[in-house]
C-alpha cells in the first residue's frame, strides 16, 4: 500500500480531520489538538504500516530493557551548597524565600482540629512528630493530608508564630 500520498496530504488537513485520521489509523480517538504532533504521529503510523513495524524480537528486547532501567522522573538534586549556587562560596544565612521564617530553634504553634501542633524550625528543614521535613508545606500536608501553603497554614504571613 502506497502511503506517500497520505503523508503529503496530512499537512493540508485541519486538526479535526487529523483527529479523525488518527482514529482510523490507531483504532482509538485522541484529544490532542497540537497539529504538528498529530502530523508526526500519523506519519509515523503510516510509515510503520507501509514498511513494517518493529519485529517481535525487537519489541521483546525493548520491553526487557524498559524493565531493567532505573527510571528517573526528575533530574537528581545537587548534593552540595556549592553545586546549588554554581560554584563560589555557599550562601550565608537563609535565602530570600525564607525571609518570613523565624530563626532556627523557634517553635511554631498551631491549633488544628482541637490539637496543639508544634513544629521546630531547624537550620535545614522543620521537625514535627519525630520527623524532619524539607518545607513547611510538607509539614502541613503531613498534618492535613492535603496540599497547603505552609506559611499560610502556620500563619507566618500574619506574624502569629510563637
Image (cartoon, rainbow, N blue to C red):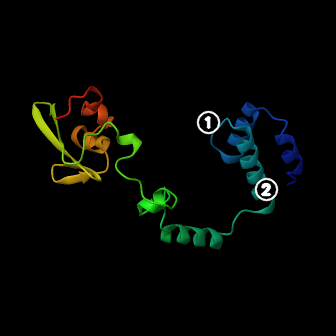
The label shown at residue 9 is none
Query: Does dot 1 land on a helix, a strand or a loop?
Result: loop
Residue 21 rendering spot, x and y as whole percentages: 74, 40
- Residue under pointer 1: 31
Q: Nearer the viewer, residue 68 or 143?
A: 143
Which of the 4 image quadrants contains residue 49? bottom right
Assign a secondary structure to mark 2.
helix
Q: How many marks?
A: 2
Can residue 64 be seen in this snapshot?
A: yes
Q: Is residue 76 visible?
A: no
Q: Would you place residue 44 above or below residue 62 in this image? A: above
Decide if residue 151 is on the left or right side of residue 68.
left
* 32 displayed left or right of 8: left
The residue tagged 2 is 47
Q: Is residue 130 above or below residue 99?
A: below
Location of residue 113 by image quarter: top left
What percent of the width, then of the height, locates residue 127?
20, 50
Residue at 59% from the left image edge and 69% from the top image edge: 62
Q: Residues within 10 Å of mark 2 (few under 14, many from 20)?
A: some
Q: Earlier in the sequence, mark 2 or mark 1?
A: 1
- Quarter of the image that includes the N terminus: bottom right
Residue drawn at 31 percent across, 41 percent down: 137
Amino acid at each position: 500500500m502506497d502511503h506517500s500520498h497520505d503523508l503529503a496530504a496530512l499537512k493540508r488537513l485541519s486538526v479535526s480531520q487529523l483527529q479523525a485520521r488518527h482514529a482510523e489509523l490507531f483504532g482509538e480517538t485522541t484529544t490532542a489538538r497540537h497539529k504538528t504532533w498529530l502530523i508526526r504521529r500519523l506519519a509515523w503510523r503510516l510509515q510503520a504500516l507501509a514498511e513494517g513495524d518493529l519485529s517481535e524480537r525487537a519489541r521483546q528486547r525493548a520491553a526487557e530493557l524498559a524493565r531493567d532501567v532505573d527510571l528517573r522522573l526528575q533530574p537528581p538534586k545537587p548534593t552540595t551548597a556549592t553545586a546549588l549556587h554554581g560554584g563560589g562560596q555557599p550562601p550565608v544565612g537563609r535565602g530570600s524565600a525564607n525571609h518570613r521564617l523565624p530563626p532556627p530553634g523557634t517553635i511554631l504553634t498551631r491549633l488544628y482540629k482541637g490539637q496543639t501542633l508544634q513544629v521546630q524550625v531547624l537550620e535545614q528543614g522543620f521537625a514535627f512528630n519525630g520527623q524532619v521535613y524539607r518545607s513547611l508545606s510538607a509539614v502541613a500536608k503531613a498534618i492535613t493530608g492535603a496540599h497547603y501553603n505552609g506559611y499560610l497554614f502556620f500563619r507566618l504571613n500574619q506574624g502569629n508564630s510563637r
